[in-house]
Amino acid sequence: MIGDISTQEANTLLRRASAASTYLLSQRTALESKLFPVTAYNSVACAQIYRDYQYNMFKELAKHISPEEIGKRSRTLAAYPNILGVWAFIGLWGLGRMQDLFDAGGAENELPERRKQVKFMIDFWYRMATSYYNSDKPLAAENNDTACVLPANILDMVKQELQPIDQDQRGKLKRTMAQLYLAEFLSYCECRASIHEMGPYPFGDNEYLIFREFSPLYDGSRLIWDWHNTKAKSPVPNLSVALVVKDMDEMVFTDFATLFPKPEDYSEHITQFALFSRYDDNIETTPFSVLADLEKFATDIQTELYLEFAEWDDVKRLKAGSSVFLKWFYIFTDMGNITNKVTMGLDEDKVGDYIQLMLNSMGHPAWARLFRSKEECDKDPSFYELLD
């Protein structure tokens, strides 16, 4: 039964999730932009996520699909959940819990009903994440900063489709991926919800196979967020770019599904590539010619969205950013076919007082816990331990 673990077991997992999340978030020092109040909307969304929202949703989901099955089914190209989603399941909830316990004066003041939820949440995450990584290590940070989740049959299929890259293709691919990155980052209110990088898979003599993915892309087939209803439509529902890179100095993959490579611009190190799109459970090769339409989609949607967002006030931008985190759970509920049976989105009855408060303060003061010394975090985890 999910959650049937001891307090000691729960705290061991909480410490592991907290340590990885603390490092991840403390390195991300520039959360603000000129457009969206990113830290503020993070704080609002995380508060609601902890206050029964995620627990109630996944308690229902567990009746329809196991966390192990979610993890297993996500081990494919252009998947969601992906590496970021697997971390965010526990990371966002952990941040919301950290905020509320900070306000309450510590873990000793956690509401009894929420204490009961902690074991379910941490156990669900661990079961899902270890199934996803096919390992007892549920985080990229615990897997030597690598994110290798694809099974052998998919890797074999990818290798059969790889082709050498020439300079013209290299330039076109680089431009298209750059424009897609900017477009998707803006589409999700300046978070990386649909941008995903994973690897490295050993390939040859100092060569590695890595993936850069954009999933989902708005192709007009399903509207989750109102502002995605743009004239610009993607020609494919997602894109997975397989790249063989050679003679890299360093490749670090984080639980944000982000690659930090050395050299930073590794385009000249690409020796082979292949393009794929996933349609339900079917993976199809994507012709190189689609890149022209994808680049146009990316540039057009940036123009449309920027003009729309520029007319919004800070409150509307905060609510939109929060809703990205709160509706994003559909990637899990879809797997259990319960998306239409649960309520998703911002609930101002739960977090209404947070909206203006977080805008005024640019985020919750509990986030200072993430920037303490390692010794302090080891003694008192950022996410707080569970008390009986």
Image: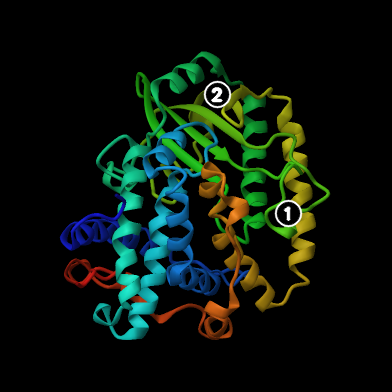
In the orientation shown, which residue stands out farthest toward the top? Answer: 160
Could you tell me residue 350's position as x and y percent? 53, 78
Callout 2 amino acid: Phe
The answer to whether residue 286 is left or right of residue 342 is right
Q: Nearer the viewer, residue 138 or 386?
A: 386
Residue at point 44%, 41% (across, down): 70
Mark yes or no: residue 250 visible.
no
Q: Which quarter of the rendered picture does the C terminus lie within?
A: bottom left
Callout 1 amino acid: His
Q: Are marks 1 and 2 in contact (CB under 8 Å)?
A: no
Could you tell me residue 248's position as x and y percent? 39, 33
Q: Nearer the viewer, residue 17 or 4?
A: 4
Q: Up-down: is 142 above or below 207?
A: below
Could you tell me residue 53's position as x and y percent? 48, 66
The local secondary structure at tag 1 comes to: helix
Label 1 CA crowd tier, 10 Å (few <14, some 14–19, many 20+): many
Residue indicated by mark 2:
273
